[in-house]
Amino acid sequence: MTLSRRLLLATALLLPLTQTPAYPQTLAYPQTLAYPQTLAYPQTDDAELTAKAKAIHDRVLKLDTHVDIDPANFTKECNYTQRLATQVNLPKMVDGDMDVSFFIVYVGQRLPTEEEYAYAYEQAIEKFDAIHRFTKEIAPDQIGLALSPAEVRSLHRQGKRIAVIGIENGYPIGTDIRRVKEFYDRGGRYMSLAHNGNSQLADSNTGEATGYSFNNGLSPLGRQVVAEMNRLGMMIDLSHPSKGANLETIGLSKAPVIASHSSARALANHSRNMDDEQLLAVKKSGGVVQIVGFASYLKTDSKERAAAIAKMRADLGFGGGAAASSFRPPVARNRACPVEDPNLSATAGDPTARMRSMFLSRLSPDQRKAYETRMAEIDAQFPPTPRASVKDMVDHIDYAVKLIGIDHVGISSDFDGGGGIDGWNSASEAFNVTLELVRRGYTEEQIDKLWSGNLLRVWEDVEKVAKQIQAQASVTQ
Ligand SMILES: [Zn+2]
């Protein structure tokens, strides 16, 4: 098996580790793993179709609900005004004409202790501060932070790129319900109640394999958080919690809900995806499911391969990503700014290869050797499915649209958090998504809904419900 092929194969293994809090600081950002430029995209299309897609792409507002960040890339010296090797930054948003990025305050699941809550809270604040620093101090002339759909539209009219803050995992609120409002006041406009691993608020999708803490649902505090998010006008994100927690949340929530980055389980049997019952429940709430360009949520490996990888992880003591721990990665020191190699094309840089390199750099030489050996055996015995493409993602969009209707489906990438597929490896390549939608016969009005209209409508509805709740509270006081 060739090296480049090997590099593309590790996605499933890497998933649980790609969102650990910081880049491995022992290496300069791995730049040497250039993406093999053999992609199927863009396909040869007739010029008319491409021109039509370009015109539509130009006119609709393009919004991505899930983009992870590393605060180390939000400093005065090293930031998203530069063409970094990240999948999203301002030059790449301009390349792909992407208007809006939800930048994510993500904190991984840790143990439910006061000490760990405090550490997680610090990490969350560092990310909130990074986004504010970027939009207010570093590049206020190029990008603004939107706190409402109205602000998204007004910043767009001013010709600026737009940042919105989403919170992935409610774990850093600890056991203090007041922190929900604090995070709202810091700009958070959606939040999920769990990530991979059960939290103090909600059971996780990973409970399918490891067991649930709250009977496949919410904790009493999680139920309070749902009510508080409704009251504040914060969207509830169902990507990552368990099916039971999600159905319970939808039942409790007075406002529509979202899934910020999930795909259809009927097409890819991964616990992170939504089955038909959940998709229909989101529709019933008036909400939206943002289908995600994340390769292993679009096409899954064979059961045998997944089992072999899980066994290898357990044997080597890497954990499953779902188990909470108290491991703290080393803090960045003298980190090189990951400026993209100018010799690469704008679309180069395979995120899977980069993440694999980051993962490997965290291992000791012995662990690394053991991992490489076992992976080679697994690759030989159970070859992975080819990496998912834009076509596979639009298959999921088609499926969801047929099941729950065009008003309840949207688009997300999970860039810099494991996302990326053939044809949509970075914000630079967003046009390929529009092109595929046009190729399948979606109209401009429908594409507008998918790229942003639905999400902004849901957000407005969540704001309206909050105003009603606040008005009722002031009447009854
Ligand atoms: Zn995620």
Image: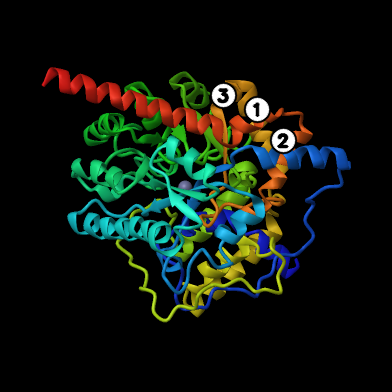
Q: Secondary structure at mark 3?
A: helix
**Amino acid type at mark 3:** Asp
Asked if the residue at tag 3 contacts the one at tag 2, i.e. Cβ–Cβ closer than 8 Å, the answer is no
Tell whether label 1 touches label 2 (CB within 8 Å): yes
Farthest residue to the right: give it.
46
Q: Which residue is mark 2?
A: 437
Instruction: Give the residue at x 38% y 34%.
Output: 236
Question: Residue 142: image x %, image y %?
Answer: 51, 57
Identify the residue position indicated by label 1 in the image: 446
The kind of secondary structure element at disc 1 is: helix
Please name whichever residue, 47 or 320, is drawn nearer the observer in this view of the structure: 47
- Mark number, residue 2: none
In space, the residues marked 3 and 1 are separated at their CA atoms by: 8 Å
Residue placed most toward the observer, 236 or 367: 236
Horizontal side of 153 relative to 182 (left or right) equals right
The tag earlier along the polypeptide, 2 or 3, is 3
Q: Which residue appears at 24% of the width and 46% of the height?
A: 182
What crowding class fits label 1: few (fewer than 14 Cα within 10 Å), some (14-19), or many (20 or more)?
some
> What color scheme is it?
rainbow
**Mark 2 or mark 1: which comes first in sequence?**
2
Q: Quadrant of residue 300?
A: top right
Q: Which residue is mark 3?
A: 407
Give the residue type that dot 2 points to.
Leu
Front-lying residue, 214 or 167: 167
The amino acid pointed to by label 1 is Gln
